[in-house]
Image (cartoon, grey):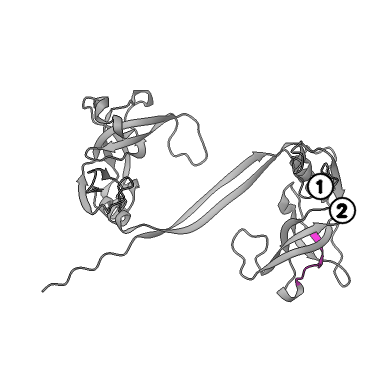
Amino acid sequence: MALPLAPEPPLSAPLDVGFDYTRSLGPVLGRFMTALRERRIEGVRGSDGRVHVPPVEYDPVTSAPLSDPVAVADEGTVVSWSWMAEPVAGQPLERPFGWALVRLDGADTAMLHAVDAGTPDRMRTGLRVRARWAAEPVGSIRDIVCFEPAGAGVEPRGPAAPATGGAEPVTMLTTPVHLAYRHSASEQESRYLRALADGRFIGQRCPACGKVYVPPRGACPADGVPTEEEVQLPDRGIVTTFCIVNVPFLGQRITPPYVAAYVLLDGADIAFLHLVLGCAADEVRMGMRVEAAWKPRERWTTSLENVDHFRPTGEPDAPFESYSEHL
């Protein structure tokens, strides 16, 4: 008697997501960043007299806009802390350090930053610390490289920041955002992705309502029952809704205008998002019949990107009634 084949393990892959987040600072935070560029720290005074560092734009008591800047020292006291024994990429220091809430002299609130204490036994609540400034400040919170213990036996700091009189104030801030993680697909998603590597679309049918889900979900979200029946689907379908992209952005591989559309494969009940190319953007319409334009077979992987885009088939448009329930 032949033994059943063991199921293939779920697919997993590292994902690396990153982009630059740019924002305008406004008058309060702009003044704070401009001061940092000059190796100074400024807070803002609230209606109850408290000095907030970093500054807040609106009073936490009255919600009114705040505009009374207050200079504070670049030395202060550790209020609370935790030890970072194994720093990760992007953190202020590459060696072990303390994350601490530091209340600067002249401030009533604490700011979060790194403390380069060397060893955890040197970290403590009440530790006096001072800012270690970047060699070339630019108007960013990273102009404070970290804080370091202050007091007797500490080496004197370097020269003050170069004068920036007449320089334009800091009004914009660009922060790189980066996230690296490993994504594991479910058993059903893994079967779907392996089918794509073979040039096929598959879905799963709900035994209760009969809807076919693509990609497979493992269970019907409407009926809550397992979807075990596998369904082979063609690589043709209908454009249900679409958007014409006219705005360029960093990393864009297609010159605008182009169309991102929801494509409902024949026999499926869920549409998915993909590109529609092969015709002018203003020719794409709801109900247009399209087919998958596959990449060369030698470039196929376990990914929906095996389909480079969808293109018009030239067939008559589908009647609205045939896809109105799937918008």
Answer with mark 1 or mark 2, whichever residue precedes in sequence.
1
Q: Where's residue 176, x and y in %?
A: 60, 49
| Three-letter code, disc 1 | Gly
Region rendered in magenta: 123-131
Tell me if residue 148 is in the magenta stretch.
no
Q: Quadrant of the C terminus?
A: top left
Q: Residue at x 29, y 29 (%)?
A: 324
Judging from the image, what secondary structure is the residue with disc 2 in? loop
Amino acid of disc 2: Gly
Q: Is residue 2 left or right of residue 101?
A: left
Q: Position of residue 220 (x, y in %)?
A: 30, 48
Residue at the (44%, 33%) spot, across then down: 255
> Is 11 placed left or right of 115 in the picture?
left
- Element at badge 1? strand
Q: Residue at x 77, y 56 (%)?
A: 110
> Mark 2 sits on what residue?
106
Per the rendering, the mark at residue 232 is none
Contact flag, marks 1 and 2 (Cβ < 8 Å):
yes
Q: Residue furthest bottom?
A: 121
Q: Nearer the viewer, residue 97 or 168?
A: 97
Observer-nearest residue: 140 or 286? 286
Q: Is residue 240 above or below residue 77?
A: above
Q: Position of residue 219 (x, y in %)?
A: 30, 52
Q: Is residue 128 magenta?
A: yes
- Quadrant housing residue 70: top right
User: Could you tell whether 32 is left or right of 305 in the image?
Assistant: right
Q: Residue 34 at what x, y percent from top left? A: 78, 43
Q: Which residue is mark 1?
A: 43
User: Which residue is nearer to you in this view: 145 or 103?
Assistant: 103
Q: CA distance from mark 1 to mark 2?
A: 9 Å
| Mark 1 neighbour class, 10 Å CA radius: few under 14, some 14 to 19, many 20 or more | many
